[in-house]
């Protein structure tokens, strides 16, 4: 006789929607007196942070913000940004943290495309927001985040909201409910809106605690911008372990190093370029940090030379890999004991691998898309990384066609070409898309090319990555000039800078006829080889 397990009921007693909101409710009680955030000389306990979040939630609801409404935030990392990672979703709304390094035109596009209802903005970014409003010819309600409180240009002040009466703690009715909206860097033109749900964020946070082996009460320096995959979901993970989150207004290498020393930082996340800047800073302690600081790094594969320097500085680096569409990291380079016997240079090469799946991710495939078969684990045969996990996006906002394409065959296709080593570790070899990762920021070659084509002297243009000593790689422009037209490299770079964010602006320009196929398509692989042979830029 077959057992009838399916008859067991699902009730509020045995099924609760998964949401990272629950992590803060617990932290505010369990870790009540312990420090939660420190910034600009102000330290708040977990109980205080919990009360502030509940008050901001109530204020949002009082303003008519509720289920499915988009609330945008334009702010550097600071406690208010951290608190909004809980307050906005607890109100039932969707958090849209906007990249503060973008130009006004793209900010305007995101505000419009996301259907944003209101904006929380750091006072220092008021000029950027005003320009974006002017482009859209639409002014949204603004809440100021300022040091100290006011003056700003918004209709309300964050501190006043945080001092108000609290809302009752509440989880979403459905864990599949949208939690956050993160925009890609527009790798194929306009940026896409990536939807995260409560369930995914909850599991990503738990998986990070397990995969990074986070201890109780770490002191975490908030470096990863919270507009990047919601700070790689670290704001939610840190509540689980009752961390002390430290925020630095001075994000220069010297400023970060001083903060690391002052607070006894034990953990941080940062792009490889930040690690390199820390290692090369004159302010770096000559004997390094002891005990070592555990560092999470992602964005572009870190050069082994940088990892060698990081080890000397006392940074114990874990390389991870992921995408905006996967809530951030989905694989990690777990250290293997035998690697400790290798020379430092070889250890660094091992550390640069993208590694194996995180605990919350199903096995990662490297697939020959032509055959649909996994590539052999020979470290040579390239395929595309396919991912299946509860931490894969809900989909692209208002773009069902792109969503269907990304999920073809029941896998999320990364667009990254990789090999699989005999030990099961994945290593990225190239990018299938023409993405340039500069200082941890994704740059769309298509977007830069579109600007170049606006220049009256340019007949044709193509943009590829060129190695850079500091930023890892930067845009390199290849241009064909129109007949009887003359323009200098400096003039073209200046033209681009007037239309693009600084990190998107080409740092070198090569004047040449573009190699094309018989159908007129630019052969970018030839341009990449030329850029590689030119060697890295120093400045």
Image (cartoon, helix red, strand yellow):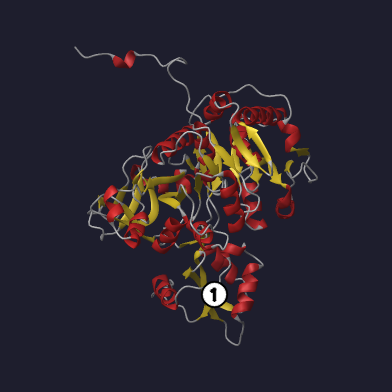
Q: Is residue 172 visible to us here?
A: no
Left or right position of 22 against 526: right
Density class for disc 1 (Cα within 10 Å; few <14, some 14-19, many ≥20) is: some
Nearest the viewer among 265 and 153 is: 265
Q: Is residue 57 above or below residue 8?
A: below
Residue 459 percent location from the top left of the image: 55, 78
Please identify the quadrant where the C terminus is shown. Answer: bottom right
The residue most toward the top is 1
- Tell me which residue sits at (65%, 27%) in the image: 51
Q: Considering the numbered disc 1 on the image, is that residue within a helix, a strand or a loop? A: strand
- Tell me which residue sits at (62%, 82%) in the image: 487
Nearest the viewer among 376 and 37 is: 37
Q: Is residue 232 above or below residue 178?
A: below
The residue most toward the right is 151
- Tell me which residue sits at (26%, 61%) in the image: 380
Nearest the viewer among 386 and 420 is: 420
Q: Is residue 534 above or below residue 223?
A: below
The residue most toward the bottom is 484
Please identify the quadrant where the N terminus is shown. Answer: top left
Residue 273 percent location from the top left of the image: 50, 59
Residue annotated with mark 1: 508
The residue most toward the front is 287
Residue 105 percent location from the top left of the image: 65, 57
- Tell me which residue sits at (58%, 71%) in the image: 452
Q: Is residue 483 visible to us here?
A: yes
Residue 442 percent location from the top left of the image: 51, 58
């Amino acid at each position: 006789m077959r057992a009838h397990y399916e008859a067991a009921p699902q009730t509020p007693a045995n099924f609760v929607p998964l949401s990272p909101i629950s992590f803060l409710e617990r932290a505010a009680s369990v870790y009540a007196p312990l420090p939660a955030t420190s910034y600009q000389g102000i330290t708040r306990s977990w109980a205080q942070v919990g009360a502030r979040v509940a008050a901001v939630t109530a204020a949002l609801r009082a303003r008519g913000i509720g289920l499915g409404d988009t609330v945008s935030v334009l702010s550097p990392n600071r406690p208010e940004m951290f608190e909004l990672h809980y307050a906005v979703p607890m109100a039932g709304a969707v958090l849209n943290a906007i990249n503060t390094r973008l130009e006004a035109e793209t900010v305007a596009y995101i505000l419009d495309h996301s259907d944003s209802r209101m904006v929380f903005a750091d006072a220092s970014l008021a000029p950027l927001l005003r320009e974006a409003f002017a482009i859209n010819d639409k002014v949204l309600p603004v809440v100021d985040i300022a040091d100290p409180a006011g003056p700003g240009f918004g209709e309300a002040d964050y501190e006043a909201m945080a001092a108000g009466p609290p809302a009752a703690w509440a989880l979403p009715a459905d864990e599949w409910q949208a939690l956050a909206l993160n925009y890609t860097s527009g790798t194929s033109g306009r940026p896409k809106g990536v939807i995260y749900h409560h369930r995914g964020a909850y599991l990503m946070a738990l998986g990070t605690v397990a995969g990074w082996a986070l201890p109780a009460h770490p002191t975490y320096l908030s470096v990863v911008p919270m507009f990047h995959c919601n700070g790689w979901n670290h704001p939610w993970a840190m509540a689980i372990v009752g961390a002390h989150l430290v925020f630095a207004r001075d994000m220069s290498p010297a400023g970060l190093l001083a903060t690391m020393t002052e607070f006894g930082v034990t953990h941080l996340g940062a792009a490889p370029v930040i690690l390199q800047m820390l290692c090369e800073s004159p302010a770096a302690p000559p004997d390094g940090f002891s005990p070592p600081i555990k560092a999470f790094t992602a964005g572009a594969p870190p050069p082994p030379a940088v990892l060698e320097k990081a080890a000397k500085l006392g940074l114990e680096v874990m390389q991870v890999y992921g995408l905006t569409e996967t809530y951030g990291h989905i694989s990690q380079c777990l250290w293997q004991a035998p690697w400790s016997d290798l020379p430092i240079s070889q250890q660094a090469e091992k550390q640069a691998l993208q590694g194996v799946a995180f605990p919350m991710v199903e096995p990662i495939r490297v697939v020959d898309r032509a055959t649909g078969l996994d590539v052999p684990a020979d470290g040579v045969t390239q395929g595309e990384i396919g991912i299946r996990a509860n931490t894969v996006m809900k989909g692209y906002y208002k773009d069902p066609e792109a969503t269907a394409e990304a999920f073809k065959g029941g896998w999320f296709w990364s667009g990254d070409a990789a090999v699989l080593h005999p030990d099961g570790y994945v290593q990225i070899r190239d990018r299938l898309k023409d993405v340039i990762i500069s200082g941890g920021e994704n740059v769309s070659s298509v977007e830069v090319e579109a600007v170049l084509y606006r220049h009256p002297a340019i007949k044709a243009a193509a943009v590829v990555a060129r190695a850079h000593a500091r930023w890892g790689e930067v845009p390199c422009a290849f241009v064909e000039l129109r007949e009887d037209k003359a323009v200098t490299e400096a003039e073209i770079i200046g033209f681009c800078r007037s239309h693009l964010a600084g990190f998107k602006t080409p740092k070198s320009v090569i004047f040449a006829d573009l190699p094309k196929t018989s159908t007129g398509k630019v052969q970018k692989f030839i341009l990449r080889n030329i850029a590689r042979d030119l060697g890295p830029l120093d400045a």
